[in-house]
Image (spheres, grey):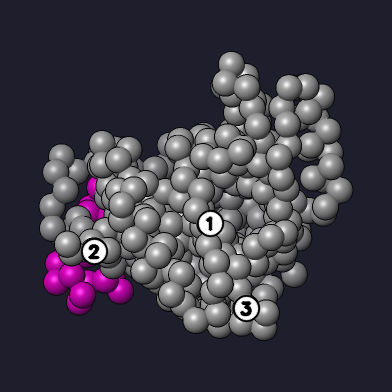
Amino acid sequence: MVDSLDIQIINALQIYPRVSWAQLAGILRVDPSTISRRWATLTNQRQAWTSCSEADAPQLREKMISALVEIRCVPGHREHVITELGRQQAISSVHCTSGARDLYVMTSTDSLLSMDRYVDERIAVIPGIVGTRTHYLRKIFVEGANWRLTALSKEQVKALHDFRPSEPPKQRKPIHRAVVAALEGDVRRTAADMQQELGRSLSMIARDIDAVLAADWVRWRVDFAHTLLGWSTAAALWLDVQPLDLERVVASLRLLNHVRLCASVTGNANLAVFLWLRDLQELDEIENKLTSAFPKVRIKDRWIIPRIAKRAGHILDLDSRHLRFVPVRHHQLFED
């Protein structure tokens, strides 16, 4: 059973994934052996997991095209489609959802043409899919990679930030990329475990790990089985927001810890908001607060999301526990 200490440990690792148990013990005022045992239980029971990846330079990230793709399936074929979509490295997430579609996926490519081809040639051709609809994300205001639990005090959060490495490498060298690749499936992997793979001394590996974790081109995630921590469902709101109100609406949504993704989109709605919920009643409360504060906002559609089958490359079971990791790759989808 996950309790408040487990949630604090996960929250702490979201802030600094390689904090030592001794360092964290001083922050949480708990014995290091207790923290170590709790984390081992969480990972062994597939309730928590970590990953690390190499990201594009900021100027390249701005050029990437991201999209949400609705998918309609032949009745009875949805599970097969989920399996096939989960295998594709260009697809970061797969969600079951309500309404006129059975699933939706998130993906990114290097151009609009590549996205159009990818949906047509790699997604729509999967047996069991009978239709797709693509929504292009114009600007992402909030994304899941930056989402955090809120189980720690401001003082504890600051203490964790103080432990984080702050000297990134001056250049992205092959050894730095090799270190990130070695940490891909577990950002807490020990230097000793990586030594044979990298062929370097423990001190050099430790130094390189600190360097890459301080780099702005490295992303890490510490994630968990959301349903086991009380987030029983998810939902998406498709909003029509007046251009002059957009900035204020987004600022208001940023204050909600329910928000996992918020992005401007193409279509009848111009703002999509994806929420984690403890129950469906929370959706009514959020809608009421939003429309009361911004009377001109129109809710064009709402989707209920009963299951997340893949999140940020991680395949999840029906209880949202971790099954396996499919590294996310967006580049060189088409050589021509």
Q: Quadrant of the N terminus?
A: bottom right
Q: Quadrant of residue 81?
A: bottom right
> As rendered, which of 211 and 99 lies closer to the eye?
99
How many C-alpha atoms fall within 10 Å of the one at disc 1: few (<14), some, or many (≥20)? some
Main SS of the magenta segment?
A: helix
- Check disc 1 and report the residue beneath it: 133
Q: How many marks?
A: 3
Labels 2 & 1 near each other (Cβ < 8 A):
no
Q: Is residue 318 above or below residue 138?
A: below
Label drawn at residue 334? 2
Report, in whole angstroms, how far the alpha carbon at label 2 lies from the one at label 1.
21 Å
Q: Amino acid at mark 1?
A: Arg
Q: Nearer the viewer, mark 3 or mark 2?
A: 3
Please state the horizontal and vertical placement of residue 193, each as a whole percent of the image: 30, 74
Q: Quadrant of residue 272?
A: top right
Quarter of image, res 306: bottom right
Q: Which of these two is toward me, 63 or 3?
A: 63
Local SS, label 1: strand
Residue 47 appears in view: no
Would you place residue 192 above or below residue 290 in this image? below
What residue is at 41 percent from the left and 42 percent from the top? 163
Q: Earlier in the sequence, mark 3 or mark 2?
A: 3
Q: Which residues are magenta?
A: 191-211
Q: Which mark is residue 16?
A: none
Figure check: 60 above or below 46:
above
Residue at position x 36%, y 69% from top?
A: 121
Crowd rating for badge 3 (residues with CA inside 10 Å; few <14, some 14–19, many 20+): few
Which secondary structure lies at badge 2?
A: loop
The residue identified by callout 3 is 74
Amino acid type, callout 2? Phe
- Percent of width and height locating residue 100: 69, 60
Question: What residue lies at 60% left-to-right and 46% top-to-bottom?
Answer: 260
